Image (cartoon, rainbow, N blue to C red):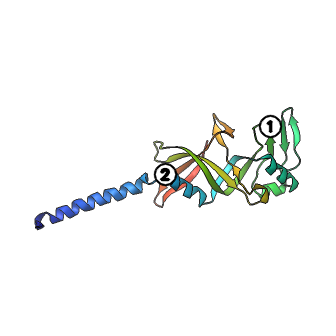
Amino acid sequence: MIDRRNAGGALCAALTVAGALWMTGCNGSDFNDGKAQTILENNSIHLDGEEVQLTQDQLNCAVENDLFETPSQASSNRYVARITQKGRDLKFTDDVSIGEFPQPAAQIRGDFNLQVTNFGSTRDPADGTKLVEVRALVKISHPCFGAGLPLMGVKKGAFSQDTLARAEFGFTQNGWQFDKIVH
């Protein structure tokens, strides 16, 4: 038999527990690699002055399609392929550098779609954000770059083709959102 005098208290306690569980879900405990991947792949991501790497075949195709000029020697161990207007139209913002990194590299700026291929660590900085190390391919709408271009990370203040990029996410009233690439 239910004691009706305590039924209201029990209902109140149950609602309190349910509310606490709901709030736990809202404060970000639902953030994981899958959530980060969904956010990065299903939204256009703004990249500002980020570096991507190209394969030699992608660079050759880009030169053949007048996106960049034929590489010329800039120093004893470095070549550059100067950017053309067609390359700028695809949101490349600088010449391709050859010899500075193991693979040719170029700078991009604008809104891009990404494909996530790998994750590193996820950290919770004190400010309530999530910082996720991620290997991602930047999608550029041109046949030369159909496979995507790997986004370079930063190590000790310099771009590195061996370092995962770090994506910062923040929690808003609409849930988790991508904030920026962190250097």
Q: In the figure, residue 112 lies in which quadrant?
A: bottom right
Alpha-carbon neighbours of circle 1 within 10 Å: few (<14), some, or many (≥20)? Answer: some
Left or right of 175 on screen, residue 153? right
Relative to residue 79, is residue 145 drawn left or right? left
- Count of numbered marks: 2
Q: Is residue 76 left or right of residue 23?
A: right
The residue located at (64%, 55%) in the rendering is 114
Q: Is residue 13 above or below residue 94?
A: below
Q: Residue 13: which numbered mark, if any?
A: none
Residue located 65% across and 35% down the image: 157
Real-space Cα distance between discs 1 and 2? 37 Å
Spot occupied by residue 30 in the image (x, y as percentages of width and height): 44, 54
Q: Residues within 10 Å of mark 2 (few under 14, many from 20)?
A: few
Residue type at numbered disc 2:
Asn
Image spot of residue 39 (x, y percent): 55, 57
| x and y, in percent, of residue 167 in the image | 57, 48
The N terminus is located in which quarter?
Answer: bottom left
Spot the residue most to the top. 76
- Under tag 2, what secondary structure? loop
Sequence-first tag of 1 and 2: 2
Q: Secondary structure at mark 1?
A: loop
Q: Do the numbered discs 1 and 2 sit on residues whose CB atoms are within 8 Å?
A: no
* Residue hosting label 2: 32
Q: Nearer the viewer, residue 151 or 50?
A: 151
Residue 38: percent from the left, percent from the top? 55, 58
Q: Residue at x 79, y 56 (%)?
A: 144
Residue sitting at x 33%, y 57%? 21
For the residue marked with disc 1, what is the amino acid?
Gly
Which part of the image, by quadrant, shows the C terminus?
top right
Q: Which mark is residue 99?
A: 1
